[in-house]
Amino acid sequence: MTAHLHAIGVATPDHDIHPAFIDWAGARIASAERRLFERMTRRAGIAHRWSVLPPTVTGGAPTTTGGFYGDGRMPGTAARMAIYAEAAPTLAIAAVEALAAQVSLAGITHLVVASCTGFVAPGLDQIVARRLGLAGSVERLLVGFMGCYAAVAALRSARHIVRSDPAARVLVIACELSTLHLQDDDRAEPLLAQLQFGDGAAAALVTAELGGFRLDRPFAATLPDSEALIRWAITDRGFAMHLSGEVPRRIAAGLADADFRQAVTGGQDPAAIDGWAVHAGGRSILDAVQTSLALAPDALNASRAVLAANGNMSSATLMFTLARLLEGPPVERGVALAFGPGLAAEGFGFGSVA
């Protein structure tokens, strides 16, 4: 039994916070590192990042003229989670509505939700199910804190569900509010890591019916001795993200390893893969994948376009990229690939239905 990804709806908030962050961060960095920050900002390949936070945030968060980016006024985790509990369901529903404009969502039997930037109970899955009016019998799965490859886990789970139950109609949602977790820092490397992240949500329908992309072989691989390179910590001031500048180099080294490369490509010649959905974790990560696999200059255009328009939205990013590929020419052999905490790579093969 083959599972098919029929369509993807996407949604972003209204507030473009990328210029505000650059101004805020640039003013904090010591002059010795400022040129590095400015140069890397220009090279980041990001034009916009969207946030649920308005220019001025009240209710426990900073109220300085810089809004959320007020000096020395970082809100506590409770205040950030209060915003998540209100804003995440709204953004997720917006993505579902965008999906419903493309395909019928009647008869949903399963709901799989990935969200790694907030916690609330009842969970985001229950809140969304209630607002959508889904039957109480709908089976739910919540994927949390896996980071950027959580969408792979969500879509892979949907594939397993459909393969075990051909009548299943699985609604998959990835919703992330990364900008809630701004950290008070004045060093270039952590601020450049924060420069990558934005908010977004995506929703997809997976069934056994023919249409869209078939979901093929899933894969998972871990780079040894790299667990400290990407990590999150829950602190009293939100979720602190650590993204080492070593990540692109380690990814490039991994893709040079025969076993790791075999896992990612399924033994195929990378040049024969005509659809690449690589998680847009940053320009340097995309460059590392493209160079290591000797891909054509335009092979990662969809990923680069998502990065430019939205930044890195954690788990939602990969689904944004797949949405762009669904709108384009048919894909005969595709690979979806995301890197995240571990340092691990997860993904799956896919291809258009003739």
Image (tube, rainbow, N blue to C red):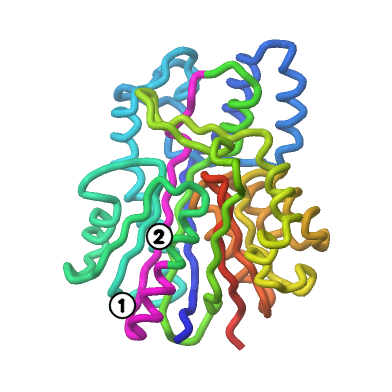
From mark 2 to mark 1, how far is it between C-alphas? 16 Å
What is the crowding at mark 2: few (fewer than 14 residues within 10 Å), some, or many (at least 20)? many
Q: Which mark is residue 219?
A: none
**Mark with earlier residue (2, 1):** 1
Residue at the spot 69% in from the left edge and 76% down from the top edge? 329
Q: From which residue to which does the magenta span run?
A: 157-184
Residue 217 x, y percent position in the rendering: 55, 74
Contact (Cβ within 8 Å) of mark 2 with mark 1: no
Nearest the viewer among 29 and 236 is 236
Residue 107 x, y percent position in the rendering: 28, 78
The amino acid type found where label 1 is placed reads Ala
Residue 23 x, y percent position in the rendering: 62, 22
Residue at the spot 47% in from the left edge and 17% down from the top edge? 70
The amino acid type found where label 2 is placed reads Ile
Q: Position of 354 compared to 252: left or right?
A: left
Residue at the spot 43% in from the left edge and 25% down from the top edge? 56
Q: Quadrant of the C terminus?
A: bottom right
Q: Which mark is residue 106?
A: 1
Residue 191 versus residue 168 in the image, above or below: above
Figure disc tally: 2
Mark in front: 2 vs 1: 2
Q: Quadrant of the N terminus?
A: bottom left
Nearest the viewer among 171 and 220 is 220
Query: Is 314 one of the magenta-colored residues?
Result: no
Q: Helix, strand, or loop for circle 1?
A: loop
Residue 195 versus residue 154 in the image, above or below: above
Residue 102 x, y percent position in the rendering: 46, 73
On the image, which quarter does residue 271 sit in?
Answer: bottom right
Q: Looking at this rendering, what residue extends furthest in the left direction?
A: 136
What is the crowding at mark 1: few (fewer than 14 residues within 10 Å), some, or many (at least 20)? few
Q: Which mark is residue 173?
A: 2
Query: Is 174 one of the magenta-colored residues?
Result: yes
